[in-house]
Amino acid sequence: MDKIIKSIATNGAFRAYVLDCTETVKTAQEKHQTLSSSTVALGRTLIANLILAANQKGESKVTLKIIGNSSFGHIISVADTHGNVKGYIQNPGVDIKKTATGEVLVGPFMGQGHFVVITDYGTGKPYTSTTPLISGEIGEDFAYYLTESEQTPSAVGLNVLLDEEDKVKVAGGFMLQALPGASEEDIKRYEERIQNMPAISRLLASDNHIDALLDAIYGEDDYKRLSEESVRFHCDCSKERFKLALLSLAKDDLIAMKDEDHGAEITCQFCNEHYHFSEKDLEEIINDKAE
């Protein structure tokens, strides 16, 4: 079961979230049939958005848009406060690795662009905040967003490791943030620890990567786990929702779909689920629209 663990240093100086999102990213890869680079980029985005949503309360939803101008195109994700996340990448077929090491490349294929966060608190007035992409690696861009937009000094590590067949082997990450009570000595100590921290890929490859992440973050400092919550890839699309979308179309367009196309096929961008509307379905929608 995938999970996010929230923790805090005993002295109240720092808090950290650590995540295991292996099954979540596996599901995304299966649904979108992504190749290596696209899998890692989409996976990192999903993990980042789960962290953003975990920072919210109530029934909030967070839409994360990684808007790039290179091979990936845009990566879009939506997450809620119940641990549900969905997402897609415009180009699922990017498959580039370093020749010598086999390392999957991401940053160069994100290009320049923006890290856009839209938070919907359910009030009808969503809040949008944007920062530029600084590397395209997503984890660094996320840390920059937290520091610049939310004015919270943060360290972030996100990654997806693939097996020899480029299937998701393990996915996860962490976010570390300084709290208002942190002293200069605390901050210096944690900065040095993060700088000397093993690579996120190495920590995720550990037998128990949740404990490995927590140990690397806190070192000898005492901390306590505040909560452990499950996370998952879940799309809330349905035929009823797409029916409502069809109801918003002009009557002439619906009639053309029925008479000329003899039905309609709609695919959800977020999960690739297909919904078929027969001529009879469209006739009912036309009649509903007339009423």
Image (cartoon, rainbow, N blue to C red):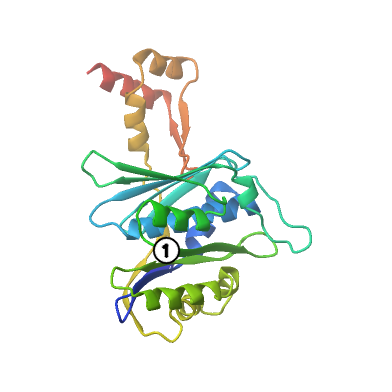
x and y percentages locating residue 280 in the rendered image:
38, 24
> Does 5 appear above or below 162?
below
Q: Residue at the location (28% across, 41% down)?
A: 126
Q: Residue at x 47, y 81 (%)?
A: 215
> Residue 217 at what x, y percent from top left?
46, 76
- State the image coordinates of residue 285 (x, y, percent, origin top left): 32, 24
Q: Amino acid at mark 1?
A: Ser
Q: Residues within 10 Å of mark 1 (few under 14, many from 20)?
A: many
Name the residue rendered at 30%, 81% in the picture.
11
Whether 179 is drawn above or below 128: the answer is below
Q: Residue furthest front?
A: 184
Q: Quadrant of residue 153?
A: bottom left
Q: Which residue is mark 1?
A: 154
Q: Is residue 90 left or right of residue 278?
A: right
Looking at the image, which is closer to me, 254 or 182? 182
Q: Residue furthest top?
A: 252
